[in-house]
Image (spheres, rainbow, N blue to C red):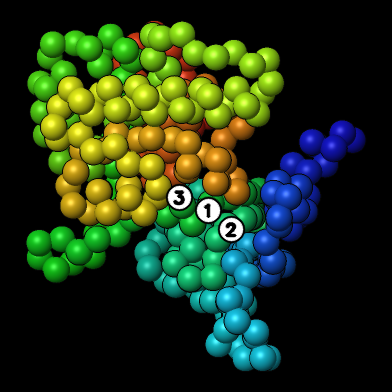
Amino acid sequence: MTSDIRLAFAHPEERSLASASADPRDRISLRDHVVEADIGAFQQERGLKQRLRFNVVVEVRPAPTPLEDDVDRILSYDRITESIAAELAAERLNLLETLAARVAERVLEEPQAMRVFVRVEKLDRGPGALGVEIVRSRAEAPLRAVDASGALQSLHPLVVFLDNATIAAPDLAARLDGWQARGLPLILTVGLPDLPRAETGHKPTQRRIDLLAIEQNAWTLAARDDRCVVVATRTEIDWAMKNGKTIVWAPSKLVLDAVDGPHSREPVALALWLAELTAAEGFIVHGDVTVPAGSRVSVERA
């Protein structure tokens, strides 16, 4: 059995280790936690309890101070089991995928949690276990803000990739009006400019040069419309979304600082990574460019 196939069926803890950065985080895990629930999309599953098995691994940030053997300074295992129980009690669900995602999102609300692997399996649907496994990071949990009524709401932005022809188009302002009319926070991303740039033949340095060239193009876009605000950090993105600003992303800092960052330096792949990072509602692509497959974000071609 190849290493990739073995890892596909390995416990989430082993998968977490395999995908860790050079500076791995601490982990806590819940193994083989079995509960009964009424879940399933098929009629024969309705009204019947069936066993679900959960395996969960949570990567946590290092404790800022000595633990001093104090349970209040760590992420308790109870938070994981309570998250499972709370989501099962909230409403009846059809899909394990929905359940896993909601458990992951609830776990990521804990301040220590940074990344979570959730595997959920049905044990009574056949001779084997049928299940799903997901991984979510804190960055993928949606930003939340208080709306005009005082209620807490999740902010899911619209991320748009603009090719150079669209940036230079005379109807750019009208396009911005149309995207803003959707009522979502708006994040604009761009590719490489139509200008010569240094070619080093060395991947790490070329990546930085390309990222800086993309940022030059971001400032070019911002110069076309006063509504555009160029931002570089997640803190700036969150602030701008909460305050209704039209964001233009300068990618260098966020990409280079990310522990689980994108391996590609292709501009569209970076923009799609940002869409997933911010739990975007959708991703619109302008231009004849290739969009990587397998995204969790809905992709629309303009």
Q: Residues within 10 Å of mark 2 (few under 14, many from 20)?
A: many
Residue occupied by mark 3:
140
Tell me residue 161's x, y (percent). 34, 24
188 up-or-down from 53: above or below: above
Name the residue beneath numbered marker 1.
Answer: 137
- Pointer 1 with pointer 2, Cβ within 8 A: yes
Q: Secondary structure at mark 1?
A: strand
Label 3 near label 2: C-beta < 8 Å?
Answer: no
Is 271 on the left-hand or right-hand side of 209?
left
Up-down relation of residue 178 to residue 288 (above or below):
below
Residue 263 image position (x, y, % from top left) = 61, 32
Residue at the far right: name it. 1
Mark sitting on residue 49: none
Q: Secondary structure at mark 3?
A: helix
| Side of 133 relative to 4 (left or right) | left
Residue situated in front as seen by the camera: 133 or 234:
234
Along the line of sight, which residue is nearer the eye, 213 or 6?
Answer: 213
Callout 3–callout 1 Cβ contact below 8 Å:
yes
- Residue shown at the point (76%, 47%) measured from the top left: 18
What secondary structure is marked by label 2?
Answer: strand
Determine the image quadrant of residue 32.
bottom right
CA separation, marks 2 and 3? 11 Å
Reading the image, the residue beneath label 2 is 116
Residue for point 15% across, 41% down = 183
Q: Amino acid at mark 2?
A: Val
Residue at the spot 18% in from the left edge and 22% down from the top edge: 224
User: Dot 1: few (<14), some (14–19), or many (≥20) neighbours within 10 Å?
Assistant: some
